[in-house]
Image (cartoon, grey):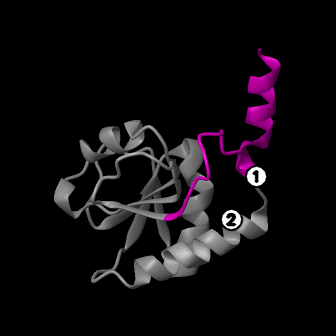
Amino acid sequence: MDWSEIESIVKRLSNQILKLPRTFSSITTVSRGGLIPSRLIADQLDIKKIFVDKTKINSNSLFVDDIFDTGDTFDEIIKRVDVPSKLVFVTLFARRGKKYPKQLLYGKKTNNNAYVVFPWDKLEFQRSKNDF
């Protein structure tokens, strides 16, 4: 995967977000995986505040991550939101074949179960391959 594909997905996803019947004053994310997509989406939506690794999450903040895979991040995040039913959880990719929560908004489904290597994950991915 390259940056041009990421930029295309971010633009498509940002357009989906703009069609929602609400706006967001901030983005909340996790540092591993969500930080770079958050910045890209914030730029598209002209959102100035990005909160990272918060223990309490305001439901008026858009939550951004790179991929919805096992659902573990979503399960952890939903517990931290002040009004869980109002959470909008945005990811660049959603793992094909998973059950998606109604709060999920994604840019693209994965083609298969292969590991998705984002441009910001390349070094980490290489290190994990060398550990085997």
User: Is residue 87 visible from the viewing direction of this image?
Assistant: yes
Q: Residue at x 33, y 38 (%)?
A: 76
Mark positioned earlier in the residue sequence (2 or 1): 2
- In the rendered image, residue 119, in percent from the top left (x then y), is placed at 76, 52
- Is residue 123 part of the magenta span, yes or no? yes
The span picked out in magenta is 107-132
The picture quadrant where one finds residue 9 is bottom right
At x 48% / y 46%, what residue is drawn? 30
What is the number of the mark on residue 119? Answer: 1
The residue lying toward the viewer, choosing from 7 and 59, is 7
* Residue 130 x/y as whole percent: 82, 20
Under circle 1, the secondary element is: helix
Residue 65 shown left or right of residue 37 in the figure: left
Q: Is residue 60 above or below residue 35?
A: below
Residue 52 placed where, x, y %? 47, 50
Position of 43 relative to 78 (above/below): below
Do callouts 2 and 1 mark residues in contact (Cβ within 8 Å)? Answer: yes
Is 41 left, or right, of 63 in this rendering?
Answer: right
